Image: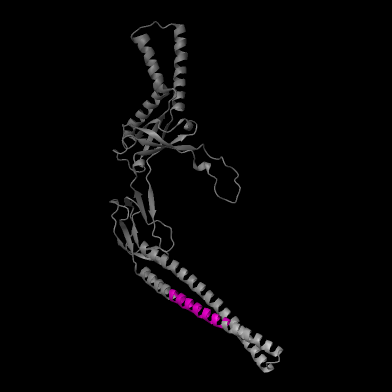
Amino acid sequence: MSWILAALYCGAIWLVFAKLKLLRLTLPLAIVLASVGPSLIVALLFCAQYFHPFTSKAIVLEEVIPVTPQLSRPGRVTEIVVQPNKMVMAGDVLFKVDPVPYQNNLARLEASLEQAQQSKEVAEASVEMAQAKLDQASSDLEFASANRKRQKTLMGEKAGSQQELDAAENQFKVASASRATAKTQLVQALLSVDVAATQVKQIEVQRNDARYDLDQTTVVAPSDGFVTNLQVRPGMLVGGGTTNSLVSFVVDPPERNRGVVVAMFNQKNYLRIKNDQYAEVALYNYPGAIFTGRVITTIDVTAAGQMPVSGILPTDVASGSPSSFAVRIKLDEGDELRIPGGARAMAAVYTEDIQIAGIPIMFLIRAKSWLAYLM
């Protein structure tokens, strides 16, 4: 850029003093022209590269969801429904896994759940029986206690016999033991109900997991979009706790993300970029074209600003080259353009400071856009 400005400046001097001879070139004037002109060019270029950030590191990003069936045990793929690179809607079937093993597991757990619920009902009935026995034993104990007291009173009045008192004492001891036994049986019956209820809950959880597994045998689209790089084939074993992605699902971007270019700017003038500033973008797949847009997001963090989770203290937190920061630019014509994910671009943001210094950047991005025909 400096060579171009220098050539224009020299051409203007030649035109004025040699070609058109509008002025006479004197020594003092030549000294002024040789010192002022280059100084102005250097100042203009400095202001241009500092106040109006430019980068050739810009790219179009797409949201890609790795699709993996969440199956607790391996299953075999039986049918591929989706066609690669064709739009589908959220909930459309992508492929299917053999559901028979999961149906059998669900049926087994449903039978176990029914059996556990029946066991709980039996335990609850035993509680009622134990409670009835306890009530009977309490009544017998109350009668035996009253009878013993009566016999003691009669013995004190010389109206009863020792044999009858001994019989009343024995009856009281038997009734006390029977009540203690009935109380223990009631506690055991209540514990049996709690155990049965716990078993029911455990089997219900297992049943719900089995039902979820069965639902996962039909893999559906997570949103609107399309599948690419479809390598799944019938007969393949999938699931079983593996986290490997089987399908790359490209999400149809929402309105706010269409026509958005992510540009990486050096940190020396990144802080001059603010939301809603005017920007220009040159896409390599549209040589010679300049697209206008606006800054919609400045992302004030990079990977270098994140400390890794580790039990070891870091030895150097500022190694490597200076970081670049991401800026999201929304193109004015983004909805009308075909911009593939991964498309490279150049971008320039024009701030409100020394706006005349943005002219060299405008010329630079247009020149590079035309040179894209040769790349």
x 52%, y 76%: residue: 192
Q: Position of residue 177 (x, y in %)?
A: 61, 84
Q: Closest to the observer: 345 or 74?
A: 74
Residue shown at 39%/39% (left/top)?
Answer: 59
Q: Main secondary structure of the magenta part?
A: helix
Residue drawn at x 45%, y 76% as measured from the top left: 121
Q: Quadrant of residue 366?
A: top left
Viewer-proximal residue among 96 and 304: 96
Place of residue 185 in the rendered image (x, y in percent of width and height, measured from the top left)? 55, 80
Above or below, 261 against 358 in this view is: below
Q: Which residues are magenta?
A: 116-138
Across and down, in percent, residue 260 comes to 37, 39
Identify whether 68 is placed above or below 273.
Answer: below
The answer, for residue 177, to whether it is visible in the render is: no
Q: Dividing the image into 4 quarters, which one contains the N terminus?
A: top left
Q: Quadrant of residue 273?
A: top left
Verify whether residue 137 appears in magenta.
yes
Q: Nearer the viewer, residue 64 or 156?
A: 156
Image x and y of residue 224, in percent: 32, 50
Q: Quadrant of the C terminus?
A: top left
Q: Nearer the viewer, residue 31 or 61?
A: 61
Q: What colour scheme does the image use? A: one colour
Q: Is residue 75 above or below residue 286?
A: below
